[in-house]
Image (cartoon, helix red, strand yellow):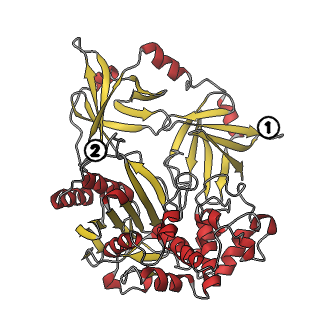
Amino acid sequence: MVINKLKLRSSLTYACLSLALILIAASSLASPAGTETQYRQYLEAAEKVQNFTGVAMVAREGNIIWAQGVGRADFESDRVNFVDTKLAIGSVTKQFTAAAIMRLHEDGKLGLDDPISKYFPDYPEEAANKVTIRHLLTHTSGVVNFTNLPVYLQWKEKDIPLDVQINAISTLPLEFEPGTKFSYSNSGYKLLEAIINQVSGKPWHVYVAENILAPAGMSNSGYDLMTVDEKDRALGYLFDDNGKPKRTELPVASTPGGAGALYSTVGDLAKWDEALRGEKFLKRASLEAMFTPFVDHYGFGFMIDSVAGYQRIWHDGMVDGFRSMFIRIPHEKLCIAVLANNHTLDASRVANHLMAIALGLPYDVPVNKTPAPVDTASYQDYVGAYDLGNGQYRMITSENGKLYSQRSGGTQSQIYPESPDKFYYEQNHATTVTFVRDDAGKVVAHSIHQEGTDLRHEKMTAGQTAAILAKTAAIKVDPAIFDRYVGEYQLSPVFSITIERKEDRIFAQATGQQQFEIFPKSETRYFLKVVDADIEFVMGADGKAESLILFQAGMEQKAIKK
């Protein structure tokens, strides 16, 4: 519900994360750059400002040009992170599982277009005859993601046999026709794990260690971080709103398995990048297949896209207490790896900034700022809509002496005064908005500074702003009707939205999130001010809501009332 604050994906699921935050596409390739001082200053600022704790590395042509550990591997004992500290890599594991499948394919032991019925005779035929190994590799199978199921919370704490996990997954219908769309599913890589076990005659992680990690020279990588001597590994943490770390425990390794149970070091990931440029364990044709997008930029265990004219091959990872990001820029033979033992921090943001430094692209160093004293009466000068182009806008509003910014389709954010007419964002103090006045002192535009670039957007007319606001104007309704909607609505087995009435107001609260007021567009349709999203209540025969539909970013999600 704040719907990009709503965590609809599990701790093992990738997210595109900060792709759009970094880097405006350039018409020509930038000159590779980056100095050790720049990398160090950025990472140490990330530690100080954003509580980054972990290890980062930049390598070119197989040679590490900079690596550094910051923060603590163990906050209780004050043990620091070193460059060779081992950390869980979460879903970065998937590329190693994919490589193992390709090795077995090269050996003639399986076909990429084999239906999974060939390997799972007890899997319901209707699904098993449609889903292929290729679908599993590319997240286009339609198989339900097990980390969204209630049983996942139990599996995290117990060593559940793989066949039991697969049986639970197989009982659920496919979410869509295989091959028709992309939907990230850890279940697909659990099925691949089982196929590797069956075809190779060895446990998945043993086969990967012998046939993928060993040829790549990755002697500091393996399965199940908890089996590593504690002095050589980092512990996982969550940081609270006050920046205080709290220990978290990894799931039992057999639960993420082929979807996310490996650990590594940044040095080993540099070796992995080098191996992917050669033919140490796979032929060039197999590697190219892994790096070819199938649907929505996903290949075999890798995302493939471009930044500022450079092809980027990457994957991120997230598992309790740990975040990771592995990036390859083939044109420059460049590799960036970030391994963090702070689950709260977005490791991909750090990695993408290090990539920007390496490629000579604009970036901002994390900073902490303190609000400056200003006359809040001036806030009315800024209120209105600003034209971002292509039908998009940013709405600036003021309420109770505070100023807010909200991009169409985005989340409302408070912005704080840095100096007259200049404000910074609460989420990232380096991102600023400066309001531009004409010679008469009237605000006519604003300039957004983000990731080292500045973009000016003109202020829209009062009439244009009024037309936008009219689309989200609350109407008056009898508060008694709110009672029809009160209750808990389940979007997924682990995620619900709870509707509550408080006197003459109505509120919505998502699992693990704070409560926000919703406002009526009609008696059954409501909107949020903190995010561009609507809720439509679907009424039952008894006159009470039986479900709701959440509308956001062109998507509709139905939630059934419990």
- Which quadrant is the N terminus positioned in? top right
Q: What mark, if any, has residue 429 been given in the picture? A: 2
CA gap, disc 2 and disc 1: 48 Å
**Residue type for callout 2:** His
State left or right for residue 36 relative to residue 543. left
State left or right for residue 49 relative to residue 144. left
Viewer-proximal residue, 277 or 171? Answer: 277
Viewer-proximal residue, 15 or 531? Answer: 15
List x then y, in percent, for residue 121.
77, 77
Residue extending farthest right: 541
List x then y, in percent, for residue 215.
41, 82
Q: Is residue 343 visible?
A: yes
Q: Nearer the viewer, mark 2 or mark 1?
A: 2
Q: Which residue is rendered at x = 64% and y = 76% of the image?
A: 110
Q: Which residue is rendered at x = 35% and y = 77% of the image?
A: 86
Tag 1, which secondary structure?
loop
**Residue type for callout 1:** Gly
Q: What mark, if any, has residue 138 been given in the picture? A: none
Among the 4 quarters of the image, the one containing residue 194: bottom right
- Residue that numbered label 1 is attached to: 543
Q: Which residue is rendered at x = 42% and y = 84% of the image?
A: 214
List x then y, in percent, for residue 412.
44, 37
List x then y, in percent, for residue 544.
76, 40
